Amino acid sequence: MPREALTFDNDAIAKVLDEIGDLIELKGENVFRAVTYRAAARAIRDLREPLSKLVEEKRLKEIPKVGPSVAEAIEQLVATGVSKRHADLQAAVPPGLLTLLRVPGVGPATARMIYDHLRITTIEELEEAARDHRLQQLPKIQAKTEENILKSIAALRQRTGRSLLHEARASASEMVAYLKERTGLERIVVAGSLRRYRETIGDVDIVVASDAAPPIMAMFVAAPTVERVLAQGDTKSSVVVDRGLQIDLRVVPPESFGAALLYFTGSKEHNVRLRGIALRRRSRWTGSRRSSVRIAARSMLRASTACRRSSTSPT
DNA sequence: CATTAGCG
DNA sequence: GCTAATG
């Protein structure tokens, strides 16, 4: 098994340095400091040698734009995975402001100004404020700018192919309500990233407990919001609703509902770790102790092996 | 070595 | 924050 990679590679460190640059600007510190951190990040991406090696050989200063401060940050990142400068900035800047910078047309100064006036920290809130024309009441922002921000957000979403939480939730709730009404079943639950309240959603996952899958699948693909049917099977069906949002429906036996819900809620990384714990400890679990980790890990084993049998792919 | 202008 | 120039 490959060793746990706590070691930051060059690219990961460059990413942190770039983020330090953004945070410096958001905080309102000297812009040239931010510029320096970004210049150092660029130089690091061009390196052909691992930073950990340069640290050992005390040759960090040979990298362009790396002086005492940046070198210290790099050393800390290599050694511990975190940097004090980065942590301090994170503490000083409202969480979420960083994500507003993703919107083309919204730079550090604008992000700060919007936050100071409206306490906006997410792209959803920004979009809502723009729609309500609350942005153009702010200094330096007029109708044209507000419009550009809306377009940028739309383009952003187009690129990532993901939906915002509230949109995906609306579509998912509608489908769940429809299925509950038509099937009379109670255990129809949203899983996946939507259940984890991620702020953007790739696909919506819905899990149903039932031994009679086919009629449920038939109702699902015939739902009024469905624009297109991607697949219809006994354990899983996929449809497209709204403008491009995909919904996957899984029907599982009632006795597997808990395990399935756990499994399909993910994340994938979470599942991998949970499964690892379960495999490692299985031999020692002969039925003595109760613990949530144990129960979750056993469920994960059952769900993942069941999934392998039916050759259904995870999220 | 310390100070400082310039940097985009 | 870094670099190069200056004294």
Image (cartoon, coloured by chain):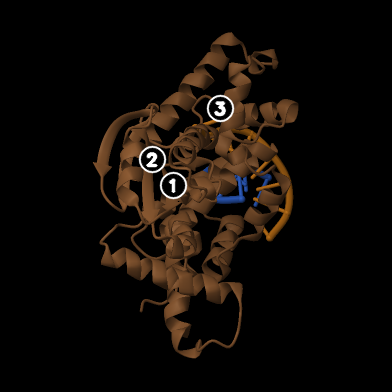
Chain colours: A brown, B orange, C blue
What is the three-letter code of the residue carrying label 2?
Answer: Ile
Q: Amino acid at mark 3?
A: Val
Q: Which quadrant would the N terminus of chain A be assigned to in this image?
A: bottom left
Element carrying mark 3: loop
On the image, numbered disc 2 is attached to which residue? A247
SS category of the residue bearing label 2 = strand
> Do marks 2 and 1 share a subunit?
yes
Q: Which residue is mark 3?
A: A106
Q: Are marks 2 and 3 on the same chain?
A: yes
- To which chain does the residue with label 1 belong? A
Q: Quadrant of residue A291?
A: bottom right
Gap in angstroms between the C-alphas marked 1 and 3? 36 Å
In this image, A307 relative to A64: left or right? left
Amino acid type, label 1: Ile
Closer-to-camera residue (A14/A187): A187
Location of residue A211 by image quarter: bottom left
* Residue found 32% across the figure and 36% down from its top: A221
Q: Nearer the viewer, residue A173 or A142?
A: A173
- The answer for how far apart the CA atoms under marks 2 and 3 are is 32 Å
**Residue A19 percent coordinates (x, y):** 55, 47
Q: Earlier in the sequence, mark 1 or mark 3?
A: 3
A294 left or right of A89? Answer: left
Whether label 2 touches label 1, CB < 8 Å: yes
Q: Chain of mark 2?
A: A
Q: Which residue is mark 1?
A: A206
Q: Residue at x 72, y 32 (%)?
A: A119
Q: Residue at the top extreme?
A: A143
